């Protein structure tokens, strides 16, 4: 794997739609070996009022997605899944998807974001830690392969304006 700097992505973010399903499944199946989202689950999440599917698009191609779950009245949102096509990775698309997921949760009055990570997915854990997530728990036997999930959480500032006001005081 090349460690040389890559050109930052010029991907645009938008809401997912039915026409994205084939591309989303291709990314899902390449990114994960188990506990994959099926076409049916993607379809359900696309129309659910408690989910937001954010898609990154680059040069007309779906480059990645983030799926956020926000249960009614709950103040803790959850990244249900996030993935970027491997040939388009390490150019900031994942970080932008993660930030957009957090913005979506904030707009819906989420106070914190949570995520479960497969205990072997060390790279993803380091990545979340860089983005401000902290380990707070473990779910045993969480995945299809009986592996544990490590649980990460990040507090979400109420709004960006609120954060700026706090800094300026
Ligand atoms: C985790 C994942 C979503 C990250 O997506 P991504 O688009 O590669 O993410 P980013 O480019 O924002 O950041 C990834 C790395 O690229 C680096 N990077 C970002 N922009 C870069 C650039 N322009 N040049 C070089 N490196 C860059 C980041 O520093 C980061 O490094 P790290 O992995 O050592 O921390 C992606 O790797 C993926 O789909 N993995 C498989 C699925 C998965 O594990 N999902 C998480 C499940 S919990």
Image (cartoon, rainbow, N blue to C red):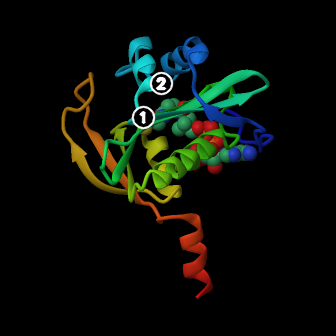
Q: Nearer the viewer, residue 139 or 55?
A: 55
Secondary element at tag 1: strand
Ligand 1, image quadrant it occupies: top right
Mark 2, secondary structure of its residue: helix
The residue positioned farthest toward the bottom in the image shown: 169
Horizontal side of residue 59 vs 50, given as left or right? right
Q: CA distance from mark 2 to mark 1?
A: 7 Å
Which residue does the image show at 59% across and 69% down from the upper left? 161
* Residue placed most toward the observer, 49 or 40: 49
Q: Nearer the viewer, residue 165 or 35?
A: 165
Residue extending furthest left? 140
Q: Quadrant of the N terminus?
A: top right
Residue at the image position 53 percent from the left and 57 percent from the top: 130
* Sequence-earlier tag: 2 or 1: 2
> In the rendered image, which residue does mark 2 sit on?
46
Residue 55, position in %: x, y?
60, 31
> Would residue 145 appear left or right of 22 to someone viewing this image?
left
Structural crowding at the residue carrying mark 2, measured as other residues with C-alpha within 10 Å and reported as few (<14), some (14–19) or many (≥20): many
Task: Give the residue at mark 1.
Answer: 51
Q: Nearer the viewer, residue 14 or 143?
A: 14
- Total marks in image: 2
Please state the horizontal and vertical placement of residue 131, each as a whole percent of the image: 52, 55
Q: Residue at x 31, y 43 (%)?
A: 72
Q: Is residue 75 above or below residue 70?
A: below
């Amino acid at each position: 794997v090349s460690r040389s700097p890559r050109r930052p992505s010029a991907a645009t973010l938008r809401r997912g739609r039915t026409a994205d399903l084939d591309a989303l499944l291709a990314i899902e199946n390449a990114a994960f070996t188990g506990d994959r989202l099926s076409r049916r689950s993607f379809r359900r999440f696309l129309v659910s009022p408690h989910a937001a599917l954010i898609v990154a698009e680059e040069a007309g191609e779906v480059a990645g997605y983030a799926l956020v779950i926000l249960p009614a009245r709950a103040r803790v949102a959850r990244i249900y899944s996030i993935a970027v096509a491997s040939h388009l990775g390490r150019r900031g698309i994942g970080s932008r998807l993660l930030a957009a997921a957090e913005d979506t949760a904030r707009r819906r009055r989420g106070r914190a974001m949570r995520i479960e990570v497969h205990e072997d997915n060390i790279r993803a854990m380091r990545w979340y830690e860089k983005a401000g997530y902290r380990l707070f728990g473990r779910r045993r036997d969480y995945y299809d392969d009986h592996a544990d999930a490590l649980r990460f959480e990040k507090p979400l500032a109420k709004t960006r304006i609120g954060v700026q006001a706090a800094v300026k005081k």
